[in-house]
Image (cartoon, rainbow, N blue to C red):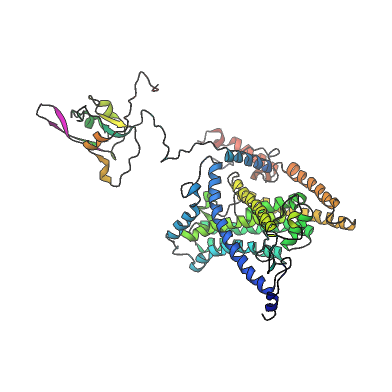
Amino acid sequence: MMHSVPLLLQVADPQLPPSPGMFVLFGLIKAGVAFGIYMLCVAYTTLLERRVAGWIQDRIGPNRVGPQGLLQPIADGVKNFMKEEALPATANKALFVMAPAIAFVPAMITWAVIPFAAPLPIPGVGLISMAVADLPIGFLFILAISSLGVYGLTIAGWSSNNKYALLGGLRASAQMISYEIAMGMSTVCVLLLAGNVNLNEIVAQQQGQAWNVVLLTMAFFIFAVSALAETNRVPFDLPESESELVAGYHAEYSSMRYSMFPLAEYANIITSSGLMVTLFFGGWDIPFTQWDNAAPHSVVKTLVTLGAYFAKVFFFVFAFIWIRWTVPRFRYDQLMSLGWKLLLPMALLYITAVASLALALDFAGVVRTSMAYTGAFLAMNVVFVVLVFWVLDRGRIVSPAYSRIERERLAKMRLGAERSDLLTGKGA
Amino acid sequence: MAITTRVVERPTDDTSYVRATFKGLALTFKHLVDPHKVTVQYPEEKWDIGPRWRGTHRMLTTEDGKAKCVACGLCPTVCPANCIKLVPSVDEQGNRYPAVFDIDEFRCIFCGYCQEVCPEEAIHLGRHYENAEYDRKDFVYDLTRLTSQTHPVCEMWDPADPRGE
């Protein structure tokens, strides 16, 4: 502390990093502010979901509490706190109580490392990085934390001592494990291009070249599909699939403890959207201009980039909701075969291709920020997109179960079906 | 009967999940920005209910405010739910009138027979549906209540004009 006093006394340059004392102080402030805004966003995502669901289904949605239903999340919160908390007699009480928190916290922690605006210069303090914790290993941290969320779901399913809840928990863990791999693999391509695991560096790389979604569309596709599966959203909401498992892992929960699970889901949606934006859509970058990331940072630049970041994240949160109210749920075998037989091999193949191209271009002496480098990746990208979405996507990405049965057996089954009374109508 | 499997013929070679998903997204987005406005904002807006809607009863009155009912006893006789309680009486001029005329709206099945059978066109079903009460016994409508209600009454089905045009 003795060293920091003279540092605090001298007038710090706002374009340079702050002193250790100020770093800690502003770290705490950032954590508090980010936490508040994040919780608010999570609460209002529930409202957004209900309104968008209403509009998509030609309904109106909740519009009674406050203007346009804007106070609905607060009313829901009050209602949930007032309700009785039922505790199943045979539940493992400690785990049962803990599970909602375990589900919720990882989504929140992940947010800590995501940069959400250009650095903010504060006169007398220094340049404050606009991520709660600008970790040098940011991305590895995300990989480590994001898979923890499944423990909440699995423990909830297990501790409820209910067969449906247990099945839901099992599905959650199986699904997470399957898609975690594809997700991690898809992001390797991003790391190959950025050459760094710091999220700020990944954003900087996209500002220098083009957004990763343009260069690595397949990686984005794999990441987006895996993110849907990771957040247990339709079409991959098998852990709670209400038509077969009542409510899945949270069948036994009630009151605020139940409410924590949907909140965790929305928190995960926001975090996944934030990650997608950071990894593939240039983070807080404003496209087609270098003004926002040029050296002299200002408050205006911070606010504008913050707005850009919010707009992008909002779009993806909306997309999550939009997809939920469009697509029906997958069958379990379709989910597994998509994850293991399509996404994972595709991700591995894509890594190989991206790594080979990057290596070849480096050997050829092409500068990483040059147009030729970007163009080469763009060309490869077009080939892959056509291959996957045009050639492969002919009943092979997701297929009916019988397409995996051998043809002779299928013919036999058809023959049997023709003779069957069920089909001819005699049996009925 | 041997157990057989029913195999449903589905197209495989020309189906696509990704393209179908995008098609679906386009459709839902169309509804999102341009919804069919079908919801009625209930307490503020209300549906026009049909002319033959059979709701809670009304007893029509003469010009001097008395119930038109002559206590003939046809409606409690025809009532299949047995929900009308009628005690007839005779006044000084020798006119019959209902001393008690209670309808238990909980028992009532809203068939409309009482209205059909009434020779004086006194008892009617009403075009009305907001019937909530705080107490069960408030659903037994007495004569005062039946005569004081003002909602429009149900039109009976006319064989000459079956569609009500």
Direction right: furthest residue: A364
Q: Where, quadrant-wise, is the N terminus of chain A in this rendering?
A: bottom right
Q: Is residue A242 above or below residue A141?
A: above
Q: Residue A260's spot in the image, x, y percent?
A: 52, 59
Q: Nearer the viewer, residue A215 or A177?
A: A215
Q: Quadrant of residue B18?
A: top right
Side of A396 where A416 appears, left or right: left
Side of B69 where B16 appears, left or right: right
Q: Is residue A169 visible?
A: no
Number of marks drawn: 0
Q: Residue A277's spot in the image, x, y percent?
A: 68, 54
Q: Nearer the viewer, residue B80 or A120?
A: A120
Side of A209 where A146 appears, left or right: left
Direction left: furthest residue: B92
For the point 50% across and 65% down, the residue is A96
Q: Residue A426's spot in the image, x, y percent?
A: 52, 33
Main SS type for the magenta part? strand
Q: Quadrant of residue B88?
A: top left
For the point 81% across and 53% down, the residue is A353
For the point 30% across and 44% down, the residue is B133
Give the magenta part as a residue range.
Answer: B88-104
Was residue A147 drawn as part of the magenta stretch in this picture? no
Q: Is residue B136 visible?
A: yes
Q: Residue B16's spot in the image, x, y percent?
A: 68, 41
Q: Nearer the viewer, residue A425 or A176?
A: A176
Direction bottom: furthest residue: A2
